Amino acid sequence: MSNFVSEFGRSADPRHATLPCFPYVQAPLKGRSLLQLRINRPEPDAPSVSIGVGLQHPPDDPCSPGTDNSSERHPTMSDRRNLFNKVWDLHEVGTLPSGQPQLFIGQHLIHEVTSPQAFEILREKGLKVLFPERTLATVDHIIPTDNQARPFQDDLAEEMMSAIERNCRDFGITLLNLNDDRQGVVHIVGPEQGITQPGITLVCGDSHTSTHGAFGCIALGIGTSQVAHVLATQSLAMNRPKVRRIEVTGERNPGVFAKDVILHIIRKLGVQGGVGYAYEYAGSVFDEMTMEERMTVCNMSIEGGARCGYVNPDQTTIDYIRGRPFAPQGEAFDRAAQWWLSLASSDDAEFDDHVTIDGAEIEPTVTWGINPGQSVGVTESIPDPEQFHADERTGAEEALQFMGLDPNQPIRGLSIDVAFIGSCTNGRLSDLREAAAVAKGNRVSDGVRALVVPGSQQVRKQAEHEGLDKIFEEAGFEWRAAGCSMCLAMNPDKLVGREISASSSNRNFKGRQGSPTGRTLLMSPAMVAAAAINGCVTDVREMMTPVSV
């Protein structure tokens, strides 16, 4: 990769030369894919980089720098475009015979579960990965978080691991394997390595790819056949969604975390409320959030039915990306940052819908049912199905029956058997700090099995440097290796029978945590820690040390 040249430059470390440092592209891809792609030229102020080793503009390319072919370009929209539409316009490369727009994908993340079939499709059709330098692989879903000795005890897990190792080797893709200290949950690794950046399009064969939208990019979860399509063509066929602005005003009260904010939004708008939309999260509550908090919110956009969610880039975004391995460096970073900030929706940007929520009304939130929209504040009681609209009543009755709960039963005090802190939603360092602050000096309740699973090896390393592992272990929590763990239980971490789990993950569907009859209560990491200590759902605010004024 010694001949990799970028306008923004990059680290000389060869480990960092396998991915572009700034995935905005302007070069055409004619003759390099299943479909005849043509990349729009960037807007005048948009920086550009070379798109890989040895790729050059063909002499007759109508869209190469210095030429004008405006009649074939996407029409320029008004300055009132929101960020989503700005980024979309920069990446739309054509219209397919089906009428669907074709979107260039700047960055592709893959993991061991949804990629094996995609690579087999490529082999069957005799295709190569078009831009292996734009694809990054990690392992997370099926790996054990206790004993990681190979071969894995689970034959299917070992088969998936062997498959991604073979596929990455055969197709020239960088793999963050267990022996790589950058390994971790895919949606935690991308941001912490600086791969996720404003203004890009990013996809992954995982529902919670919307996490990356926290940086002001279009981040989309895709299916296995689409994974194969992106590998072969570096593009995705999809219709442009509408954009809804969700503005959360005011300030959060103490003890209210990002997880509470997104659970409250989904409760208000419903699990189908976002169908056909991308969500823009805005307002003072999001302005004051850290990047890790914004990732938590965007992560669960899909649970509200939205195709994706995002937050406009600001100084918080810039400060987070600066200095990360795959980010531009020095003067190049300053130029990139200026452009990233220019992508933000203006105050008079146009949206298809607008929702306003008062942040002060949000309290620590807990799910009581079998989808993330079935939740209440910790001081509330479980609702009576009769309170629901007719089209939601049957679902509420089903949820109560499955969960073994009664209408009007207080959620606080509900006993738990398992406590899980981790996942791509809440497995970051700040999540562990919040939970450790509650656990410190306390002890997990008798009969409760409590797990803390860092989202990446880097998170685990930093947490151990800060002594968080000792706090958890002294409190009776199990301290595990990085992975998805009990979020989806495609690994040994599972519920047993009718166990009830207090979980910082993102889905409470039937069977989600490994047992067909197991029950999941979603909540923030701090709330999980409080539940683990008391053996039941607890208002974490009662355990927080008052702040002196």
Image (spheres, rainbow, N blue to C red):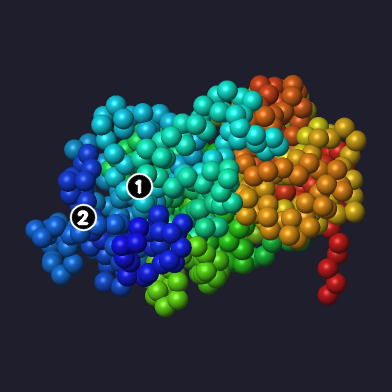
User: Within 10 angstroms of label 1, few (less than 14), some, or many (20 or more) residues?
Assistant: many
* Residue linked to disc 1: 132
Residue found at x 31% / y 42%: 129
Quarter of the image where the N terminus is located:
bottom left
Residue found at x 76% / y 44%: 479
Q: Position of residue 193 (x, y in %)?
A: 52, 58
Residue 397 falls in image quadrant: top right
Q: Is residue 383 left or right of residue 506?
A: right
User: Within 10 angstroms of label 2, few (less than 14), some, or many (20 or more) residues?
Assistant: many
Q: Secondary structure at mark 2?
A: loop
Residue 226 versus residue 250 in the image, above or below? above
The mark found on residue 28 in the picture is 2
Q: Position of residue 438 (x, y in %)?
A: 82, 53
Q: Amino acid at mark 2?
A: Pro
Residue 291 versus residue 142 in the image, above or below? below
- Measure how far apart labels 2 and 1 are at the Cα level: 16 Å
Residue found at x 49% / y 48%: 210
Q: Position of residue 206 (x, y in %)?
A: 49, 39
Q: Earlier in the sequence, mark 2 or mark 1?
A: 2
Q: How many marks?
A: 2
Q: Is residue 198 left or right of residue 503?
A: left
